[in-house]
Image (tube, rainbow, N blue to C red):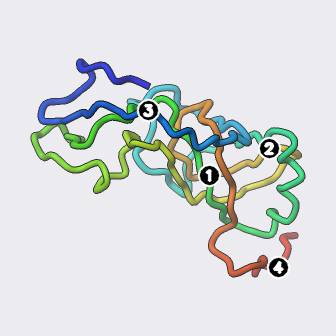
């Protein structure tokens, strides 16, 4: 996480951060993608994007039971390498300034991201997916099925 003033683009505004209240998140896995820098990472995941792997840690592997009936799942992850102190951002470096909450930028006070991805396969503790847009090694916070009431609506694959 960078809060270096030299990382700020023209017209951007950073604030001093208060002490964290500590939400005590537990990372339940790690995401493996082909991207190692922000410059190479896509701004939005694409349904036909490259295969990515989501490694689920113990004791959470058992929680994957029943997920295979879904074609799409939502991943929530922690943007651990993003700065957290900008309130105004200049994403295009063109002088058009936007408030952080009006952007899908990885620069957020609480850098939580979500992606709706296509579930290609489940290989033991690993989800094989398409449609991600995060850096390799990103910590996984949660996995949810695509919108559902209280139980799976899809018939089992296969």
Mark 2, Cα crowd under 10 Å, few <14 / some 14-19 / many 20+, is some
Q: Compare residues 58 and 68 and report the one nearer the observer.
A: 58
Q: Please state which of the two labelled residues, at mark 3 or mark 1, is closer to the viewer.
A: 3
Q: Is residue 135 above or below residue 103?
A: above
Q: Quadrant of the N terminus?
A: top left
Say if mark 1 contacts mark 2, CB within 8 Å.
Answer: no
For the residue labelled by badge 1, is the local secondary structure a helix, a strand or a loop? strand
How much space separates mark 3 and mark 4, taking CA atoms? 47 Å
Mark 4, Cα crowd under 10 Å, few <14 / some 14-19 / many 20+, is few
Q: Residue furthest left?
A: 95
Which residue is tagged 4?
155
Q: Is residue 153 above or below residue 61?
A: below
Q: Compare residues 110 and 92 and report the one nearer the observer.
A: 110
For the residue labelled by badge 3, is the local secondary structure a helix, a strand or a loop? loop
Which residue is tagged 3?
19
Q: Compare residues 73 and 27 and report the one nearer the observer.
A: 27
How much space separates mark 1 and mark 2, taking CA atoms? 13 Å
For the residue labelled by badge 4, is the local secondary structure a helix, a strand or a loop? loop
Which residue is tagged 1?
130
Residue at the image position 64 percent from the left and 40 percent from the top: 24
Mark 1, Cα crowd under 10 Å, few <14 / some 14-19 / many 20+, is many
Say if mark 3 contacts mark 1, CB within 8 Å.
Answer: no
Which residue is tagged 2?
126
- The image quadrant that residue 102 belongs to is bottom left
Say if mark 2 contacts mark 3, CB within 8 Å.
Answer: no
- Closer to the chain start, of discs 3 and 4, is 3
Residue at the image position 80 percent from the left and 39 percent from the top: 57
Q: Quadrant of the C terminus?
A: bottom right
């Amino acid at each position: 996480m960078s809060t270096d003033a030299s990382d700020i683009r023209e017209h951007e505004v950073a604030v001093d951060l208060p002490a964290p209240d500590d939400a005590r998140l537990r990372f339940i896995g790690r995401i493996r993608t082909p991207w190692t820098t922000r410059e190479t990472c896509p701004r939005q995941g694409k349904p036909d994007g490259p295969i990515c792997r989501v490694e689920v840690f113990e004791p959470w592997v058992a929680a994957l039971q029943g997920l295979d009936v879904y074609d799409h799942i939502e991943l929530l992850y922690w943007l651990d390498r993003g700065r957290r102190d900008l309130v105004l951002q200049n994403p295009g470096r063109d002088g058009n300034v936007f408030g952080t909450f009006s952007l899908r930028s990885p620069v957020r006070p609480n850098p939580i991201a979500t992606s709706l991805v296509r579930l290609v396969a489940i290989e033991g503790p690993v989800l094989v997916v398409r449609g991600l847009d995060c850096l390799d090694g990103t910590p996984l916070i949660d996995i949810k099925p695509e919108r559902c009431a209280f139980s799976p609506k899809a018939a089992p694959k296969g």
